[in-house]
Amino acid sequence: MDKIVIRGNGELNGVIPISGAKNAALPLMIASLLTSEPLTLGNMPRLADVEALKSILSNHGVDYQVKGKRAGDTGMTGQRIAFQASQIVDTTAPYELVRKMRASFWVIGPLLARAGQACVSLPGGCAIGTRPIDLFIESLQALGATIDIDAGYVNAKAPSGGLKGATYRFPKVSVGATHVMLMAASLADGTTVIENAAREPEVVDVANCLNAMGAKISGHGTTTIVIEGVTSLHGASHDVLPDRIETGTFAACVAMAGGDVLLQNARAGLLQEALDVLEKTGTEVEAGNDGIRIRRKGGSLAPIDFSTEPFPGFPTDLQAQFMALATRAEGVSHVTENIFENRFMHVQELARLGANISIEGQKATITGVDRLSGAPVMATDLRASMSLIIAGLVADGDTEVSRVYHLDRGFELLEDKLSAVGADIRRETAG
């Protein structure tokens, strides 16, 4: 099994290109089930989750083809992939496929809308909380679907004549359930109104793509989304937006190690709250047309306080990375996790490196220390894994991070990108 070894090695300087957003790429791939025509997605990241979802979609009849490079493409430039579901050949998403990645459960929406039925295994994915599927079920039932759960599978059927437009208010904000309802309602008969909808940029990106495919969606990016159902969707070309979580992660890397790095193609508006918190550490943040420049030249890190919230608040997917940053701040920082109830699993691993962190319920108190020391640590989930890499950038000696398959799920060419700006990082394969 692979591990990543990182040694504290001074400042980071140079350019890191930001990949396409994993959290948009996956639902965009699933949207290809809604049409028989090709959906070509550009700026697609090379990730384990993307490869896994290709296999899942193939099971339903989706063919895919990697397109040729465009002028100026480099090894760190996203791929262009055409997905085409000429026909739905299977409406069952089996356990052995769905268990590998929670987002694969989202096929239930387009399968139900286009084929009138779906049988999808209950999901798996990162162990960062229960993340129940009740919101998915209730929102699809609002569109007229009949749903029951049996033997670990969700069996859904559309009414005669297809799904029907309806008004549904989510009792709590859910990005995944908003994605699913958007896709399902695009082919429903009549108008659907989603209230208390997720406002995340990835939801906006999916809605923009669906509109390019012929959907009639308005209000995306606000808490109320209106979808006027159409009888069919067509093919389209769409570029995945830059990954705001990768952006914030590499920004935290530079803040931790010091240096001057341009996060190429990053968009500040996608994570402004996180950038505001970063500036409070004493790190300079400069947004421009070519991306976001992160600088910290000398001086210590100031402590930070933040709480995770749905967009436009501080992203839960950056909580672990910024907590790692706080371990070296001069003073006491406070972090409150409001999204997932089990997202502090990285704390015990950071403690192995010398971090001083105490937990009380959903609140963490981080007292900055003068130094961290390299040690063997274990990745517990995708985002938590990066907190260990960030800490390793300044730890004395070697930090060995095992179970790095978590990192491969969500960070494209991680070692290459960090090495290019001066990090001492390498991947080793166990004999």
Image (spheres, rainbow, N blue to C red):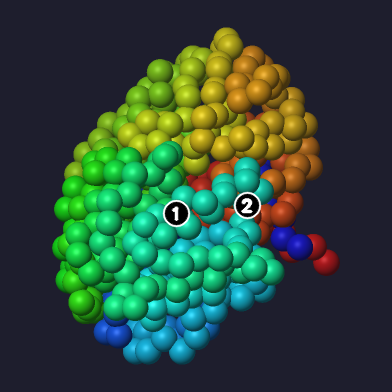
Determine whether, in the image, residue 28 is placed left or right of residue 234.
right
Of residues 270 and 73, the one drawn nearer to the viewer in this rendering: 270
Q: How far is the residue under mark 1 from the one under mark 2?
A: 23 Å
Spot occupied by residue 283 in the image (x, y as percentages of width and height): 40, 24
Residue at the farthest top position: 331
Q: Secondary structure at mark 1?
A: helix
Picture residue at 45% right of the left edge, 77% below the top: 117
Q: Which mark is residue 191?
A: none
Where residue 162 appears, as percent x and y from the top left, is: 31, 75
Against 43, residue 410 (above or below) is above
Q: Relative to 233, is 254 on the left or the right?
A: right
Which residue, given by chain and number where applicable, does mark 1 sit on? 138
- Could you tell me which residue is drawn at 67 percent across and 19 percent down? 360
The residue under label 2 is 126
Judge by depth and name the residue closer to the eye, 43 or 142.
Answer: 142
- The image quarter containing residue 2 is bottom right
Name the residue: 60% across, 65% down: 149
In the rendered image, the vertical position of residue 247 relative to residue 333, given as above or below = below
Which is more toward the observer, 231 or 31? 231
